[in-house]
Image (cartoon, rainbow, N blue to C red):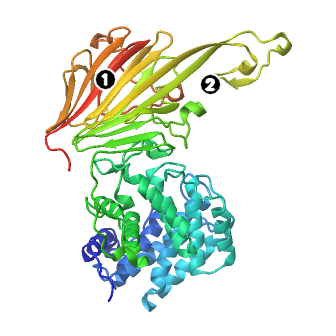
Amino acid sequence: MPTPLDHEFLRAVAGAADREAAPLAAAPDAEPAGLAHRTLARRVKTLIAAYRSPDSALHGSARAVAAATTHLRALRAAQTATGLFAGGDNVQSPPDSAFTVNDVCDAHVLAAGAGPELRDVTAALAEIARAASGSLLTGGVHTPNHRWELCAALARLHRSFPDDRLRDRVEEWLSEGVDIDAEGLYSERSANYAAHVSNPSLLLLADVLDRADLRDAVERNLAATLDLIAPDGTVETVLSRRQDQHRPFPLAPYLPHYRLLAIRTGRGDFSRAARLAAAGGIDDPDLLAGTLLTPDLCHPLPAPAARTPPRERYLTTARLAVRASATAHTVVYGGSDVPAHRRIRSGLACNPTFMRLFAGDAVLDAVRLSRGFFDLGPFRAAEVQRPADHRYRLTETLTAAYYQPLPPQLRRDDAAYRVTDEGRFCAAMSFADRPRDEISHTTRVEVDLREDGADLRIDLSGPRVPWALELTFRPGGVPEGAAPLGEGRWCLTTGPVTYRVGDDEISIEADVEAGEPLAGPDRSDLLGYDPGQDYAVVGGTDATTGNRVYLGGHGPQTLTLALRAHRAAPAA
């Protein structure tokens, strides 16, 4: 008896493809000027998938074939003499070209099985793929996920144009091991690159090479991601080492991976995530090709597994905790790379947000703490401890120095000392050779997670320095009980503050246990976010936007905050 199909899913997938492909097929001779090579290849694949799919309005359409042919001409024109594609800031990039070749090879598989109407399209796709093969075979990469995208392209080339050299090169890359940690996070800890690169690439490699270990790696990543799904349907990114660390990432791109492994393994938790990923509708035009190339996607999902709150997960490798209840979803984060590397750099986890709190439509997007200590930037924990259940202690000690004269034997008559970096400043002073007078400042934040929010205890020790705690709320409400400072800023002094959106709210109460009183609204010079010199020296910032509530003053100081979520109709 044949396995049943999920016709509702297939109609939705075909509809998403048609929304992109139908306008292209309506003007099949229109030259696609100014499009990047990756967009051209993706359109070709979508057009061919629509032509092949019985659920598409373009099934068997000669105009879809004509539009694909027009795009293929533009794609071939973008291919350089090396077989790599021109365009983008990565010049002559094997991995960037691999993204395109992956789509070209998938389109070739779809076209090759479609009959004589696509004979010319099939030949053009083969020509493009073969022209790129040599450069991809020998080319290198410059990010962790590039390895798997490049391997997927080589495997697809081998699938359509068998060549043992291609398979051997894939095995050479894979022999480095997949960069996934004990918690199931890839080394870049990025939702974007997990969903768009690592997971789909490893699943393809698992199928082509019959490597169950690669499929297991994806399953582990998807299992870890379950606990990173926020109530608003996004995946937590504060831990990421890539560009997505400062913005939300939707769950929708995870749909094909959760769906495929839910169907293949029967996992109800993956089925639940797949349904959630599709809850807002299916808009990915590439999914139609996926259903044709991987028929398992077309089968019905298994029954979803219920999630019973409260739940708590601590990802030790990323130093991130999540506690979810029917009332609140709270994130605590202390996994920044900045304390160890003492710099802001692409590829490092730099986001200084150490807490978020969701209470339905009332969302505290970011809690950050600035200190005026040698302009070394906001608090980013260097260490996280768990002194008790539901409790996390985040600690950072900053050290700066004043330097004494060089020892006599290291002094130079020409005064031409080395330009060196002492951690906050570069100068021709051979800093490492000088005796140091050090000054230290320690920030300790203890978070006690509750079903209805969190209790914070913040301790700042060391010299007297200004500080400001910033609480950034998602737009939609107004902080009641706080003094307005203008331009989306408010000051919390002594009384409680409530941020309400509809029937949902988050309340804040602060108390100073030791140190000076909190600064009032007349000290707005203290009440702001300081990104630190690494951003300021180039005129940049990583500041948040939204409704920002500040507490501030001068340390040393110890204060407590009670953050409470209140919901008229808590989530089930």
Q: Provide residue 307's location: percent of width, then percent of height.
A: 28, 54
Give the residue at x 30% y 68%.
16
Q: CA distance from mark 2 to mark 1?
A: 32 Å
Q: Secondary structure at mark 2?
A: loop
Q: Provide residue 53's location: percent of width, then percent of height.
A: 34, 81
**The image quarter in which residue 452 lies:** top left
From this view, report whether residue 91 is shown above or below residue 431. below
| Residue count near mark 2 (Cα–Cα under 10 Å), binned few <14, some 14–19, many ≥20 | few
Q: Residue furthest bottom?
A: 116
Q: Provide residue 496's location: percent of width, then percent of height.
A: 21, 21
Residue 46 visible to an observer of this rendering: yes
Q: Provide residue 387's location: percent of width, then percent of height.
A: 44, 31
**Which marked residue is nearer to the observer: mark 2 or mark 1?**
1
Query: What residue sits right under mark 2 in the picture?
Result: 423
Query: What residue sits right under mark 1 in the picture?
Result: 561
Disc 2 vs disc 1: Cβ atoms closer than 8 Å? no
Give the residue at x 27% y 19%.
492
Q: Nearer the viewer, residue 164 or 102?
A: 164
From this view, report whether residue 534 is shown above or below residue 238. above
Residue 545 visible to an observer of this rendering: no
Give amino acid for label 1: Leu
Give the residue at x 45% y 19%.
371
